[in-house]
Image (spheres, rainbow, N blue to C red):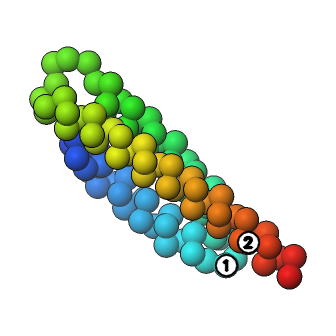
Amino acid sequence: MVSGTAVSSPLGFLVVTAIVGVLATRDSVIGTIADALALVVAVFTIIGSLGEALAPDPVTAPRVVLVASGVLGLVFAALIAWSVFRDLRVRRSLKRS
């Protein structure tokens, strides 16, 4: 539940990410709160990805797998952040209308 691998996050983290993603689609205050939680998820993804990519030796997976996993995690975190900021901008423009 709390241990992941070089190519997958822990199950609990994936479940939280999915729930936050679904809640962020709401048009209420719940959606805005979920957007904020999605930024927290992005920060944890960044921390985990950097830890993965910069893991000290000895490692149990090939270094290229760890680095690739870290890079993909950073891209995923950037996409989460971009989505949140876009969603908040859309929410603000809808409030003005």
Q: Which mark is residue 81?
A: none
Q: Quadrant of the C terminus?
A: bottom right
Residue at image position (43%, 59%) is 17
Left or right of 61, for residue 67: right
Q: Dot 2, how many residues are within 10 Å of its Cα: few (below 14), some (14-19), or many (20+)? A: some
Q: Determine whether 66 is above or below 72 in the image.
A: above
Residue 4's x, y, as percent?
Answer: 24, 44
Q: Label 2 to label 1, Cα distance in Å?
A: 8 Å
Residue 60's x, y, as percent?
Answer: 12, 29
Left or right of 97, for residue 45: left
Residue flagged by tag 1: what amino acid is it? Answer: Asp
Left or right of 56, for residue 43: right
Residue at image position (27%, 40%) is 68
Residue at image position (65%, 67%) is 87
Q: Dot 1, how many residues are within 10 Å of its Cα: few (below 14), some (14-19), or many (20+)? A: few
Residue 31 sits in which quadrant? Answer: bottom right
Residue flagged by tag 2: what amino acid is it? Answer: Arg
Residue at image position (25%, 50%) is 8
Helix, strand or loop under label 1 = loop
**Are the residues at dot 2 and dot 1 in contact (C-beta closer than 8 Å)?**
yes
Residue 76's x, y, as percent?
Answer: 42, 52
Q: Nearer the viewer, residue 35 or 83?
A: 83
* Count of numbered badges drawn on the protein: 2
- Residue highlighted by disc 2: 91
Q: Nearer the viewer, residue 60 or 53?
A: 53
Helix, strand or loop under label 2 = helix
- Outermost residue to the bottom: 97
Residue 56's x, y, as percent?
Answer: 26, 18
- Residue highlighted by disc 1: 27
Residue 17 in sight? yes
Residue 74 sits in which quadrant? Answer: top left
Residue 37 in sight? no
